[in-house]
Amino acid sequence: MFKSLRDNLSHRSLSLRYLFALTLIALLVTASTFSFQKIIADERYASSTIDRAGDERLLLETIKAYHIAYLAYRGEARQAVFHKKLSDAATALETNHQALLDREESQNLGGEMIPAVRALYFEEPVQLNKQISDYVALARTLLSLSDQELDEKPILSSSFIDRTDTLLNDMHLVVKAHVQQSENALKKMAQVELLLWMSTIIILMLEAYFIFRPMIKTITQQFFSLETQTQTLEAKVIELKSTQTELVKSQKIASLGRMVSGFSHELSTPIGIAVSAVSQMQEAADRITYEININVINVESLKVNAEKLNETAGLAANNLARAGRMVENFKQSSIDRHSELTREFNLKKLSKDTVYNLSHQLKNKSVTVQTNCPDHLILDGRPGLIEQLITNLITNSLAHGFPDKGGKINLDWMLDSDNQNIIFNYQDDGLGIAEAILDHIFEPFFTGQRTGGSGLGLYICHSIVTQDLSGTIRCESTENQGVKFLIKFPLQVDMKKHHDAVLVSD
């Protein structure tokens, strides 16, 4: 049962145990406080009683001395002085004793006489209360007698002295009783302190066993559980980063796939025209061959077929050349995308070629792209990064900025005033980006619309600019007023050198 109480720890159980322990301690402290207060009050009252008993003893000694002096100076002038002092002392004794009785009756000090002292004052055989009253009365009787009457009744004087000694002895009993009471009170306080100390130790031991021990056990278990969860989460984070890397790669491949799709559509037109022209050339050649074989040559027919053959040959040659240029551009683009090798490239031509490879998607959305770039801005680097950057920005605009209508995109390339950095301002006049999500657009897997995208397009742009190009990218946009990406990255040393050479040659 104790093991169950110790190990069954919950928030409610812990709170109840704490409350119970605090209640016990509060009760012990309260009880000990009241006990100490009662003892202190009794001792304060006893101290007052002892003080008054001391005054009474002093007055008794004074009365005894004045009585002797009063008898010794009979018939002399000084007898009147001691008569007055003896009377005053008796009155003071009576007043002091009456104050003691009044205080006992009203209990104005918050206590009362201890039973032993009360017995001395009010019960037989001592009856201090009666003795003091009789003693004061006897003193006043002696004072009322003349010298002759005192001589006739010497027993009164002798009795007065005996009563004084008896009262002094009885007052000593009062003090002794209070001393005994004080010693008992000190023993009681020591017992209460010992009980309080032992109870506190027991309560603390119970708290340690029923509260702190299971709590430490629970905390230790939670710590190990948290450590296990942390290790699991770290493994999940590593796995997530790996998955993210793979998704980024997949997104780049998907971007290339979309461009290939557009390129194949564009390539089909010149190839189709060339195939049709070759077919017409074959028909014209067959006609000429037929006329030659039958030995009937029609000059007009020969001229028509020769002209047709010449025209279609030129048409086929032009379109095949056009297809060849497209293949060459795309081939170079593919090499740039999948190679880490750097090369020199014309930034304006690269931008236009990238836009051309996306022309099919742009035509479907009726979106035009305007490229503004210095003609002779030749860079030395990895053109695949720039192409990927432009491709992702354009496809992002097509997916989110122009869902239902046409529009315009501007690609503005320039050098800063010190020829130290490339500045690329990308701007469209589409739907723009809501302010609520503007701060999240570069986060991986974040997408503001259900377009079926992966949410990695702008994240890849951010990675290319900040990691690969060591630059900065920020976005400015107002909803329904288009979007603007401000990109800036440092011009590499070899890039800057070549650019300066071009400027000099110009």
Image: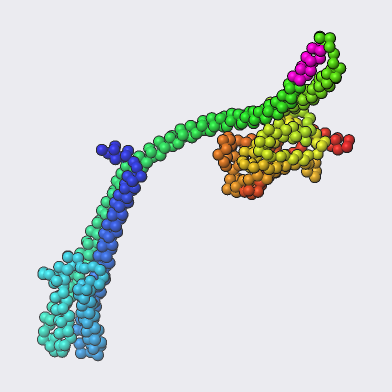
Q: Quadrant of the N terminus?
A: top left
Say if 394 sits above or below 137 in the image: above
Q: Is residue 172 above or below residue 364?
A: below
Q: Is residue 310 visible?
A: no
Q: Position of residue 44 (x, y in %)?
A: 27, 67
Left or right of residue 498, residue 152 in this image:
left
Query: Residue at position x 11%, y 84% from top?
Result: 153
The answer to whether residue 148 is seen in the rendering is: yes
Q: In which quarter of the view is residue 37 placed?
A: bottom left
In the figure, is residue 291 to the left or right of 445?
Answer: right
**Residue 357, located in which quarter of the rendered image?**
top right
The magenta span reads 279-291
Q: Residue at x 73, y 30 (%)?
A: 382
Q: Which part of the image, by quadrant, shows the C terminus?
A: top right
Query: Which quadrant of the structure image shows residue 107?
Result: bottom left
Using residue 413 as the reference point, say whether residue 450 is left or right of it: left
- Between 484 and 169, the one lying in front of the other is 484
Nearer to me, 245 or 214: 245
Question: What residue do we see at 38% from left, 38% from top?
Answer: 218
At which x and y percent is residue 475? 66, 45
Q: Is residue 285 magenta?
A: yes
320 vs 37: above or below: above
Residue 223 place in picture, x, y as percent: 44, 37
State yes or no: residue 52 in magenta.
no
